[in-house]
Amino acid sequence: MEFAHLTVLSLFCLAFVGITATSPGEDYWQSIWPNTPLPKTFSDLLIPNGKTNSLPIKTEELNQYSTLFFEHDLHPGKKFVLGNSHPVGNIIRPFRKSRQGVTDSIWLANKDEQSLEDFCYSPTAIAEHKHCVSSLKSMIDEVISHFGTTKIKAISSNFAQNQDQYVVEEVKKVSENAVMCHRLNFENVVFNCHQVSKTTAYMVSLVASDGTKTNALTVCHHDTRGMNPELLYEALQVTPGTVPVCHFIGNKAAAWVPNHIVDNLRC
């Protein structure tokens, strides 16, 4: 009888350990930022085999990235329709011709197909530094190396589902020193962490057409010499290196910034 009790107790303990066990990536995160929740944006980095069964970024999320606009468009009352866009009057509207992957292809020549290796090992654009990471630990090490400190935070957007029309409610400047980490649109879980010189990050409060409120991480690039000239001209009728260009950051990405700047903006 005593043996049976011990067996049951052992099984219970094993089950409890299985439930509460954390991954090495989570342990590493907590060792640096104790009692700080891991942002949902990075949860894919905890998948055991490092691969999903489908492409992670759907059409709706692609539209979050592919809205290009000018910095002076960031003011209360401005209307946006998510998608590849250009300004018409007081409204940002989609392109007639849809595109995909603007979040990274604004820094690259257009390609119908591109392998993960093509992207990660391609030369960086002018004024850009990039690094592909496939684990939470490698991402943490990369951003700490960039900032030279652990006093940093990750912030991200929380766009509402099934909403593509928004009005700007408030604009807050976050930082002029940010590292953006984007989930690449491949089944293998890889993030592109890159930093582009002369870039300003904002957190923009938006109100959807149904009244839903959301926060949109937004970056404005002041050095656009390395941007895709075809996309810039189609979106804004400008050429690289002439004027600052901005775009939203979708839910599958985050910005790492100094933590003293954004104490109330963690997402």
Image: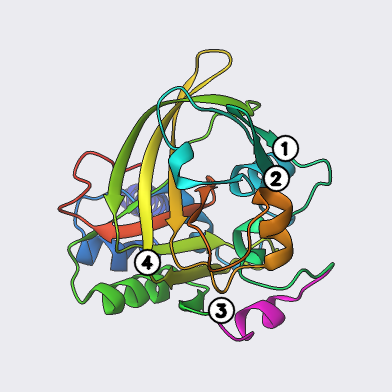
Mark 4 near mark 2, Cβ–Cβ under 8 Å? no
Task: Write down the quadrant of residue 138 in the picture.
Answer: bottom left
Q: The magenta stretch spans which residues?
A: 113-125
Q: Is residue 136 above or below residue 100?
A: below
Distance in Å between CA atoms under marks 1 and 4? 27 Å
Figure quadrant of the C terminus: top left
Task: Write down the quadrant of residue 14 in the picture.
Answer: bottom left
The residue that label 1 is drawn on is 94
The residue that label 2 is drawn on is 84
The residue that label 4 is drawn on is 198
Q: Is residue 123 inside the magenta stretch?
A: yes
Element type where label 2 sits in the image:
loop
- Assign the magenta stretch its main secondary structure: loop
Q: Mark 1: give few (<14), some (14-19) or many (20+) Cα within 10 Å.
A: many
Q: Where is residue 142 in the image (x, y as percent from the top left)?
A: 36, 77
The residue that label 3 is drawn on is 125
Distance in Å between CA atoms under marks 1 and 3? 26 Å
Q: Can residue 157 be seen in this view?
A: no
**What type is the residue that disc 1 sits on?**
Pro
Residue 24 image label: none
Element type where label 1 sits in the image:
strand
Q: Which residue is drawn at 57% across and 13% down?
A: 210
**What type is the residue that disc 3 sits on?**
Ala
